[in-house]
């Protein structure tokens, strides 16, 4: 809804309202105010589109990610600020939009096996991650250790996977990634 001159005039103090019906300088000033309000009113009419990750403009997605503390995915060093020109996520902006949409449930599951698997699958778009606890890749027991089995096709995201696991696992836990090789048969 755009503010019209009459609506703007109603917001003025009484001393100014009395001069509105005349031919003084207030009438053209109200016209200018109405014109200046139009761009803001148009944005406010569709403000929800800015905050819906799958409908927002491409250049607004990184800002949403930053608000939800996902900007660490978009830089190599967590202390770096976001550059103007960057690739939002190794797996693409669509995956980043999915992570933004799932941020609340993912934050509730942070530090859990289910949360880690969900985060990895959403970030890569590849299903089939598994997590074995307290065991190493060679099968020997290893306390407070996660063996994350990575499905075929996700190896190209190796650097991103390390950052995700480092950020989502409990701090006291160590981990290793076990990549399923191309052509290798999976156990189930």
Image (cartoon, rainbow, N blue to C red):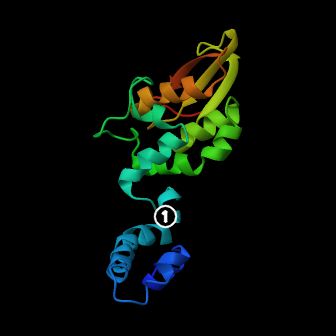
Residue closest to the eye, 49 or 4: 4
Q: Residue at x 53, y 23 (%)?
A: 178
Residue 185 horizontal/vertical position (percent): 53, 34
Residue closest to the eye, 150 or 160: 160
Q: Name the image quarter holding the C terminus.
A: top right
Label 1 environment density (alpha carbons within 10 Å; few <14, some 14–19, many ≥20): some
Residue 162 horizontal/vertical position (percent): 49, 24
| Image position of 90 with respect to 100: above or below | above
Residue 74 horizontal/vertical position (percent): 41, 35
Q: Residue at x 29, y 40 (%)?
A: 84
The quarter holding residue 122 reads: top right
Residue 71 horizontal/vertical position (percent): 46, 36
Q: Secondary structure at mark 1?
A: helix
The quarter holding residue 165 reads: top right
Any part of residue 187 in sight: no
Any part of residue 104 in sight: yes
Q: Residue at x 39, y 45 (%)?
A: 92
List the residue tagged with mark 1: 49
Residue closest to the eye, 35 or 151: 35
């Amino acid at each position: 809804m755009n503010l019209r001159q009459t609506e703007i005039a109603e917001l003025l103090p009484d001393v100014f309202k009395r001069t509105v019906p005349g031919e003084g300088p207030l009438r053209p000033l109200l016209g200018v105010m109405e014109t200046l309000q139009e761009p803001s009113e148009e944005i406010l009419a569709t403000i929800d589109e800015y905050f819906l990750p799958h409908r927002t403009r491409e250049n607004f997605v990184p800002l949403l990610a930053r608000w939800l503390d996902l900007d660490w995915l978009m830089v190599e060093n967590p202390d770096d600020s976001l550059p103007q020109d960057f690739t939002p996520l190794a797996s693409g902006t669509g995956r980043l939009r999915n992570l933004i949409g799932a941020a609340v449930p993912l934050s509730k599951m942070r530090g859990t096996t289910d949360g880690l698997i969900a985060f990895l699958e959403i970030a890569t778009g590849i299903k089939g991650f598994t997590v074995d606890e307290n065991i190493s890749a060679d099968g020997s027991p290893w306390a407070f250790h996660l063996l994350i089995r990575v499905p075929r096709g996700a190896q190209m995201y190796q650097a991103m996977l390390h950052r995700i696991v480092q950020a989502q696992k409990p701090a006291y836990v160590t981990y290793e990634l076990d990549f399923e090789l191309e052509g290798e048969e999976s156990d189930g």
